Image (cartoon, rainbow, N blue to C red):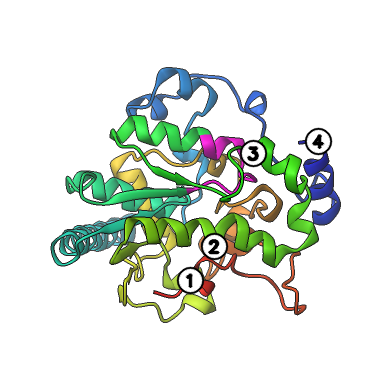
Amino acid sequence: MQAITAALLALLGGASAFVSVPHTAITRYESRSALSMGLSPTLAKTFPRDFTKIPTGTDYGTGVDAQLNKEDEASRIAYLEQSLAETLKKVSQVKERPVFTTALIAGDCVILDAIAKAGLLDKIDVIFIDTFFLFPESLEFIEELEQHYGFKAKRYHAADVATQEEFYEKYGEDYWMEDIDQYDLKCKVEPLQRALRETNTDAWINGRRRDHGAERAALPVWEGTKVNPLAFWSFEDCWTYLRKHNVPYHPLHDVGFSSLGDMQSTRKVPLEKWFTYGGERSGRFEGLKNKDGSLKTECGIHTEIKT
Protein backbone atom coordinates (compact mmCIF):
# COMPACT_ATOMS: atom_id res chain seq x y z
CA MET A 1 0.00 0.00 0.00
CA GLN A 2 2.96 2.35 0.45
CA ALA A 3 3.50 2.46 -3.29
CA ILE A 4 -0.15 3.40 -3.84
CA THR A 5 0.02 6.19 -1.30
CA ALA A 6 3.21 7.60 -2.81
CA ALA A 7 1.71 7.57 -6.28
CA LEU A 8 -1.46 9.24 -5.07
CA LEU A 9 0.41 12.00 -3.31
CA ALA A 10 2.49 12.65 -6.40
CA LEU A 11 -0.58 12.78 -8.61
CA LEU A 12 -2.72 14.93 -6.35
CA GLY A 13 -0.08 17.39 -5.26
CA GLY A 14 1.22 16.14 -1.95
CA ALA A 15 -0.15 15.34 1.46
CA SER A 16 -2.07 18.61 1.72
CA ALA A 17 -4.13 17.64 -1.33
CA PHE A 18 -4.86 14.04 -0.40
CA VAL A 19 -5.68 12.74 3.02
CA SER A 20 -6.35 9.09 3.74
CA VAL A 21 -7.35 8.64 7.33
CA PRO A 22 -5.90 5.48 8.88
CA HIS A 23 -7.98 3.87 11.58
CA THR A 24 -5.48 4.84 14.28
CA ALA A 25 -5.69 8.50 13.25
CA ILE A 26 -9.37 8.78 14.08
CA THR A 27 -10.04 10.03 17.58
CA ARG A 28 -10.84 7.05 19.73
CA TYR A 29 -13.82 7.82 21.87
CA GLU A 30 -17.24 6.32 22.21
CA SER A 31 -19.46 8.73 20.29
CA ARG A 32 -22.90 9.24 21.74
CA SER A 33 -24.29 9.77 18.25
CA ALA A 34 -22.76 6.51 17.03
CA LEU A 35 -24.13 4.56 19.97
CA SER A 36 -27.57 6.09 19.58
CA MET A 37 -27.50 4.97 15.95
CA GLY A 38 -27.51 1.43 17.25
CA LEU A 39 -24.00 0.68 15.98
CA SER A 40 -21.55 -1.73 17.51
CA PRO A 41 -19.79 -0.13 20.52
CA THR A 42 -16.52 -1.61 19.28
CA LEU A 43 -16.91 -0.07 15.84
CA ALA A 44 -18.12 3.18 17.38
CA LYS A 45 -14.75 3.57 19.12
CA THR A 46 -12.97 3.42 15.78
CA PHE A 47 -15.62 5.13 13.69
CA PRO A 48 -17.30 7.89 15.69
CA ARG A 49 -20.05 9.65 13.79
CA ASP A 50 -20.67 13.25 14.82
CA PHE A 51 -23.26 15.32 12.98
CA THR A 52 -21.73 18.51 14.37
CA LYS A 53 -18.81 17.93 11.99
CA ILE A 54 -21.17 17.95 9.00
CA PRO A 55 -21.94 21.41 7.55
CA THR A 56 -25.42 22.85 7.18
CA GLY A 57 -26.37 24.78 4.09
CA THR A 58 -29.50 26.80 4.83
CA ASP A 59 -29.30 30.24 6.40
CA TYR A 60 -32.41 29.96 8.57
CA GLY A 61 -32.19 33.55 9.79
CA THR A 62 -33.40 34.52 13.24
CA GLY A 63 -36.64 34.88 15.11
CA VAL A 64 -39.80 34.24 13.13
CA ASP A 65 -37.81 33.72 9.93
CA ALA A 66 -35.87 30.86 11.51
CA GLN A 67 -39.04 29.24 12.80
CA LEU A 68 -40.83 29.46 9.45
CA ASN A 69 -37.81 28.29 7.46
CA LYS A 70 -37.43 25.23 9.69
CA GLU A 71 -41.13 24.47 9.37
CA ASP A 72 -40.84 24.69 5.59
CA GLU A 73 -37.81 22.40 5.67
CA ALA A 74 -39.62 19.86 7.84
CA SER A 75 -42.59 19.86 5.45
CA ARG A 76 -40.33 19.42 2.42
CA ILE A 77 -38.41 16.53 3.98
CA ALA A 78 -41.65 14.86 5.03
CA TYR A 79 -42.86 15.09 1.44
CA LEU A 80 -39.57 13.79 0.05
CA GLU A 81 -39.60 10.89 2.52
CA GLN A 82 -43.11 9.93 1.54
CA SER A 83 -42.26 10.15 -2.15
CA LEU A 84 -39.13 8.03 -1.64
CA ALA A 85 -41.06 5.36 0.25
CA GLU A 86 -43.77 5.27 -2.42
CA THR A 87 -41.19 4.98 -5.20
CA LEU A 88 -39.45 2.07 -3.48
CA LYS A 89 -42.73 0.29 -2.81
CA LYS A 90 -43.81 0.85 -6.40
CA VAL A 91 -40.51 -0.61 -7.64
CA SER A 92 -41.10 -3.74 -5.60
CA GLN A 93 -44.66 -4.00 -6.94
CA VAL A 94 -44.16 -3.37 -10.65
CA LYS A 95 -40.70 -4.91 -11.02
CA GLU A 96 -39.77 -8.51 -10.39
CA ARG A 97 -36.04 -8.37 -9.54
CA PRO A 98 -35.02 -4.93 -8.22
CA VAL A 99 -31.48 -4.30 -7.00
CA PHE A 100 -29.86 -1.37 -5.23
CA THR A 101 -26.20 -0.51 -5.81
CA THR A 102 -24.52 1.33 -2.96
CA ALA A 103 -21.27 3.30 -2.96
CA LEU A 104 -21.89 4.13 0.73
CA ILE A 105 -22.21 7.89 0.13
CA ALA A 106 -24.77 10.01 1.98
CA GLY A 107 -27.59 9.59 -0.55
CA ASP A 108 -27.05 5.84 -0.67
CA CYS A 109 -27.39 5.74 3.12
CA VAL A 110 -30.73 7.52 2.76
CA ILE A 111 -31.96 4.95 0.25
CA LEU A 112 -30.78 1.98 2.29
CA ASP A 113 -32.47 3.34 5.41
CA ALA A 114 -35.69 3.93 3.46
CA ILE A 115 -35.58 0.41 2.01
CA ALA A 116 -35.19 -0.98 5.53
CA LYS A 117 -37.99 1.20 6.93
CA ALA A 118 -40.29 0.05 4.12
CA GLY A 119 -39.55 -3.60 4.96
CA LEU A 120 -38.11 -4.27 1.51
CA LEU A 121 -34.65 -5.65 2.29
CA ASP A 122 -35.91 -9.14 1.47
CA LYS A 123 -37.21 -7.96 -1.91
CA ILE A 124 -34.40 -5.65 -3.07
CA ASP A 125 -30.89 -7.09 -3.38
CA VAL A 126 -28.08 -4.77 -2.25
CA ILE A 127 -25.00 -4.81 -4.51
CA PHE A 128 -21.58 -3.54 -3.46
CA ILE A 129 -18.61 -3.24 -5.84
CA ASP A 130 -15.18 -3.62 -4.26
CA THR A 131 -12.71 -2.05 -6.67
CA PHE A 132 -9.74 -3.14 -4.50
CA PHE A 133 -8.79 0.55 -4.25
CA LEU A 134 -11.43 1.67 -1.77
CA PHE A 135 -10.67 3.34 1.55
CA PRO A 136 -10.29 0.72 4.31
CA GLU A 137 -13.07 2.58 6.14
CA SER A 138 -15.46 1.81 3.27
CA LEU A 139 -14.94 -1.93 3.64
CA GLU A 140 -15.56 -1.75 7.38
CA PHE A 141 -18.58 0.50 6.92
CA ILE A 142 -20.39 -1.92 4.59
CA GLU A 143 -19.99 -4.60 7.25
CA GLU A 144 -21.27 -2.17 9.86
CA LEU A 145 -24.36 -1.49 7.75
CA GLU A 146 -24.98 -5.19 7.21
CA GLN A 147 -24.92 -5.73 10.96
CA HIS A 148 -27.05 -2.66 11.67
CA TYR A 149 -29.83 -3.43 9.17
CA GLY A 150 -29.58 -7.21 9.13
CA PHE A 151 -28.85 -7.92 5.47
CA LYS A 152 -25.98 -9.28 3.38
CA ALA A 153 -24.81 -7.37 0.34
CA LYS A 154 -23.92 -9.18 -2.87
CA ARG A 155 -20.25 -8.30 -3.38
CA TYR A 156 -18.53 -8.12 -6.74
CA HIS A 157 -14.98 -7.32 -7.85
CA ALA A 158 -12.62 -7.90 -10.78
CA ALA A 159 -13.49 -11.25 -12.28
CA ASP A 160 -10.07 -12.85 -12.66
CA VAL A 161 -8.79 -12.48 -9.09
CA ALA A 162 -10.16 -13.43 -5.70
CA THR A 163 -8.52 -10.87 -3.41
CA GLN A 164 -6.89 -7.46 -3.35
CA GLU A 165 -3.52 -9.10 -2.84
CA GLU A 166 -3.98 -11.24 -5.95
CA PHE A 167 -4.99 -8.17 -7.94
CA TYR A 168 -1.85 -6.28 -6.91
CA GLU A 169 0.35 -9.28 -7.71
CA LYS A 170 -1.19 -9.67 -11.15
CA TYR A 171 -1.69 -6.05 -12.22
CA GLY A 172 0.34 -3.95 -9.80
CA GLU A 173 -0.67 -1.27 -7.33
CA ASP A 174 -0.50 1.45 -10.00
CA TYR A 175 -2.74 -0.25 -12.56
CA TRP A 176 -5.16 2.68 -12.53
CA MET A 177 -2.34 5.00 -13.63
CA GLU A 178 -1.32 2.82 -16.58
CA ASP A 179 -4.70 2.77 -18.34
CA ILE A 180 -7.54 4.45 -16.48
CA ASP A 181 -10.18 3.35 -18.99
CA GLN A 182 -9.15 -0.28 -18.69
CA TYR A 183 -9.00 0.08 -14.92
CA ASP A 184 -12.56 1.42 -14.84
CA LEU A 185 -13.71 -1.42 -17.08
CA LYS A 186 -12.03 -4.18 -15.09
CA CYS A 187 -12.66 -2.92 -11.56
CA LYS A 188 -16.01 -1.14 -11.88
CA VAL A 189 -17.94 -1.55 -15.10
CA GLU A 190 -17.51 -5.29 -15.70
CA PRO A 191 -18.23 -6.28 -12.06
CA LEU A 192 -21.45 -4.27 -12.12
CA GLN A 193 -22.42 -5.62 -15.53
CA ARG A 194 -21.91 -9.10 -14.11
CA ALA A 195 -23.98 -8.26 -11.04
CA LEU A 196 -26.86 -6.93 -13.13
CA ARG A 197 -26.65 -9.95 -15.43
CA GLU A 198 -26.50 -12.54 -12.64
CA THR A 199 -29.41 -10.98 -10.77
CA ASN A 200 -31.27 -10.57 -14.07
CA THR A 201 -32.59 -7.33 -12.67
CA ASP A 202 -35.34 -5.31 -14.24
CA ALA A 203 -34.88 -2.33 -11.89
CA TRP A 204 -31.50 -0.86 -10.92
CA ILE A 205 -32.02 1.52 -7.98
CA ASN A 206 -29.18 4.03 -7.59
CA GLY A 207 -28.45 7.30 -5.82
CA ARG A 208 -27.86 9.72 -8.70
CA ARG A 209 -29.34 13.20 -8.26
CA ARG A 210 -29.82 16.27 -10.45
CA ASP A 211 -27.62 18.44 -8.23
CA HIS A 212 -24.61 16.16 -8.77
CA GLY A 213 -23.73 18.24 -11.81
CA ALA A 214 -24.46 19.01 -15.44
CA GLU A 215 -24.29 15.41 -16.69
CA ARG A 216 -27.16 14.53 -14.34
CA ALA A 217 -29.10 17.81 -14.36
CA ALA A 218 -32.12 16.40 -16.21
CA LEU A 219 -32.45 13.06 -14.41
CA PRO A 220 -35.97 11.66 -14.02
CA VAL A 221 -36.94 9.20 -11.30
CA TRP A 222 -37.91 6.48 -13.78
CA GLU A 223 -35.28 5.93 -16.48
CA GLY A 224 -35.86 2.64 -18.28
CA THR A 225 -34.60 -0.06 -15.98
CA LYS A 226 -32.74 2.52 -13.89
CA VAL A 227 -34.60 4.06 -10.97
CA ASN A 228 -33.28 7.30 -9.45
CA PRO A 229 -35.48 7.82 -6.36
CA LEU A 230 -33.42 10.80 -5.14
CA ALA A 231 -33.36 12.58 -8.51
CA PHE A 232 -35.08 15.69 -7.11
CA TRP A 233 -33.36 15.69 -3.72
CA SER A 234 -30.47 18.00 -2.88
CA PHE A 235 -27.32 17.01 -1.01
CA GLU A 236 -28.57 19.09 1.91
CA ASP A 237 -31.87 17.19 1.84
CA CYS A 238 -29.92 13.95 2.23
CA TRP A 239 -28.15 15.24 5.33
CA THR A 240 -31.39 16.64 6.75
CA TYR A 241 -32.85 13.13 6.46
CA LEU A 242 -29.78 11.48 7.97
CA ARG A 243 -29.86 13.87 10.92
CA LYS A 244 -33.60 13.51 11.43
CA HIS A 245 -33.45 9.73 11.60
CA ASN A 246 -29.95 9.41 13.12
CA VAL A 247 -28.86 7.23 10.20
CA PRO A 248 -25.37 5.66 10.11
CA TYR A 249 -23.17 7.38 7.54
CA HIS A 250 -19.64 6.88 6.17
CA PRO A 251 -17.04 7.75 8.83
CA LEU A 252 -14.86 9.76 6.44
CA HIS A 253 -17.58 12.38 6.01
CA ASP A 254 -16.58 13.59 9.47
CA VAL A 255 -13.08 14.46 8.29
CA GLY A 256 -14.06 16.42 5.19
CA PHE A 257 -14.88 13.98 2.38
CA SER A 258 -18.23 14.99 0.89
CA SER A 259 -18.30 11.96 -1.42
CA LEU A 260 -16.42 8.65 -1.32
CA GLY A 261 -14.92 6.55 -4.07
CA ASP A 262 -11.49 5.08 -4.73
CA MET A 263 -8.57 6.40 -2.71
CA GLN A 264 -6.75 7.68 -5.77
CA SER A 265 -9.73 9.65 -7.09
CA THR A 266 -11.25 11.11 -3.94
CA ARG A 267 -10.22 14.31 -2.23
CA LYS A 268 -11.58 16.37 0.63
CA VAL A 269 -13.94 19.22 -0.22
CA PRO A 270 -14.07 22.49 1.78
CA LEU A 271 -17.17 22.47 3.97
CA GLU A 272 -18.47 25.70 2.45
CA LYS A 273 -18.58 24.01 -0.96
CA TRP A 274 -20.48 20.86 0.05
CA PHE A 275 -23.96 22.18 -0.71
CA THR A 276 -23.18 24.21 -3.81
CA TYR A 277 -24.33 22.90 -7.19
CA GLY A 278 -22.09 19.96 -8.06
CA GLY A 279 -20.14 20.53 -4.85
CA GLU A 280 -20.60 17.06 -3.42
CA ARG A 281 -18.72 15.38 -6.27
CA SER A 282 -16.18 18.16 -6.79
CA GLY A 283 -13.58 16.12 -4.92
CA ARG A 284 -14.04 13.11 -7.20
CA PHE A 285 -11.69 12.54 -10.15
CA GLU A 286 -9.99 15.91 -9.53
CA GLY A 287 -6.82 16.15 -11.58
CA LEU A 288 -7.66 13.03 -13.60
CA LYS A 289 -8.28 12.98 -17.33
CA ASN A 290 -9.82 10.57 -19.79
CA LYS A 291 -7.61 9.09 -22.50
CA ASP A 292 -8.93 11.69 -24.96
CA GLY A 293 -7.65 14.48 -22.69
CA SER A 294 -11.05 15.59 -21.39
CA LEU A 295 -11.59 16.04 -17.67
CA LYS A 296 -12.79 12.91 -15.93
CA THR A 297 -16.16 13.21 -14.20
CA GLU A 298 -17.49 9.64 -14.32
CA CYS A 299 -16.05 6.19 -13.73
CA GLY A 300 -18.08 4.57 -16.49
CA ILE A 301 -20.67 2.77 -14.40
CA HIS A 302 -23.45 5.14 -15.45
CA THR A 303 -22.07 6.12 -18.85
CA GLU A 304 -20.96 2.73 -20.21
CA ILE A 305 -23.69 0.49 -18.80
CA LYS A 306 -26.88 0.95 -20.79
CA THR A 307 -30.16 -0.35 -19.43
Mark whose residue sits in front, 4 or 3:
3
Residue 142: quarter of image: top left
Is 162 one of the magenta-colored residues?
no
Mark 3 vs 1, N-terminal side? 3
Q: Measure the alpha-carbon separation of dots 2 and 4.
A: 26 Å
Outermost residue to the front: 160
Q: Quadrant of the C terminus?
A: bottom left
Q: Is residue 241 visible?
A: no
Mark seen at residue 164: 3
CB atoms at circles 1 and 2 under 8 Å apart?
yes
Mark 1 vs 2, N-terminal side? 2
Q: What kind of residue is marked 1?
A: Ile
CB atoms at circles 4 and 3 under 8 Å apart?
no
Q: What kind of residue is marked 4?
A: Gln
Question: In the rendered structure, which segment of residues is drawn in magenta?
Answer: 129-139
| Label 1: which secondary element | loop
Q: What kind of residue is marked 3?
A: Gln
Q: Is residue 214 visible?
A: yes
Q: Which residue is mark 2?
A: 189
Q: Which residue is mark 1?
A: 305
Crowd rating for badge 3 (residues with CA inside 10 Å; few <14, some 14–19, many 20+) = some
CB atoms at circles 2 and 3 under 8 Å apart?
no
Mark seen at residue 2: 4
Q: Measure the alpha-carbon separation of dots 4 and 3.
A: 14 Å
Mark 4 vs 3, N-terminal side? 4
Is 137 one of the magenta-colored residues?
yes
The count of marks equals 4
Mark whose residue sits in front, 4 or 1:
1
| Label 2: which secondary element | helix
Q: Quadrant of the N terminus?
A: top right
